[in-house]
Every structure is written in C-alpha cells, then in structure tokens.
Image (cartoon, grey):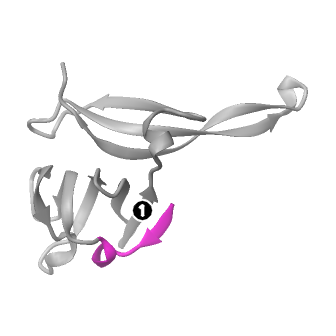
Amino acid sequence: MDIITVHDIPRDNYEGYLWYSDETKPLVYIGNEEINVGNRSDAFIVEGLLWCPKRHVSYKILYLDGQQLVCMHQVSDDDLNGKGDVTLEEFITHRISGVLRLSFIRYWFPEKDDMCENYSVLVPGKMVFVGFNNLK
C-alpha cells in the first residue's frame, strides 16, 4: 500500500464515494462518469473509498488529525479471484443511498503463534475496497 496525495489520484471512472467537509452525505460514483478527485479547493475530503476496475487500483482517503491521508493499493487478478490468503468481505451500508453493500478484499498474513507451538497461523491484515455489490 502506497501513501500518496489526493492530487496524485488520476482522473478516471471510479466506483465508490467521497464525503466532502461541506456535504451532509457522501457523493456516490457508480463508475459511469470520469471524476477528478483533487479538483476542489473550497472543501476537503473527510472520507472516501474509490475503486478503478479498469486499472485494479483502490484508494482510501481519510482526514485525520488535520492531515489528508491517501492510501493506494494495486489489486492483482489472483486477489480478485480469491486465490491465496485473501477473502472477500462485504458490509451493509447505512448512509450511502443506492448502494446495498461495500465489497472489500481481506488480506491474511502468517504469524508465528506461541500458543500453537510456534506454528504459523493466519491473522487478519489490511482490507482493500473493491467496489459495490447491489445484488440482493
């Protein structure tokens, strides 16, 4: 996962949402229009999740302690297909209109566990946003 600035996010078609500081609800993007994330100077992004299915890139944007944090993660085809130590997890949305669930890939990492005679066990690691799921 790479740390970048909001202005480093390229103009593209994204699925996800951006919640600006002057809005009462997030702006939702379903991948059918090109957006320029860093184009506003009158408000900052409090929270955002963006997924570019064409480039397999996920962005997580947070405003924390007066700083804008942007994480970028390149997702492989194997990760999307559930190969390796990854699982797909979905969460029901509450404040994002028109969207039923947010989809994430959970990465699992081996770690030695002294309670298991120092064998490696899988522990949950990072979660990466990979779009919406509107299927019931």
Q: Is residue 8 magenta?
A: yes
Q: Residue furthest bottom?
A: 41
**The C terminus appears in which quarter of the rendering?**
top left
Give the residue displayed 27% in from the left and 72% down from the top.
Answer: 10
Q: Residue furthest top?
A: 136
Q: Position of residue 106 (x, y in %)?
A: 49, 38
Give the residue displayed 38% in from the left and 66% down from the top.
Answer: 70
Give the residue displayed 45% in from the left and 58% down from the top.
Answer: 73
**Dot 1: element:** strand
126, above or below 35, in the image: above
Q: Is residue 112 magenta?
A: no
- Viewer-closest of 75 and 43: 75
Q: Position of residue 71 (x, y in %)?
A: 42, 63
Mark 1 belongs to which amino acid?
A: Met
Residue 8 quadrant: bottom left
Residue 133 quadrant: top left
Q: Is residue 22 left or right of residue 56?
A: left
The range drawn in magenta is 1-9
- Viewer-closest of 74 and 62: 74
Q: Position of residue 28 (x, y in %)?
A: 13, 49
Q: Is residue 63 left or right of residue 26?
A: right
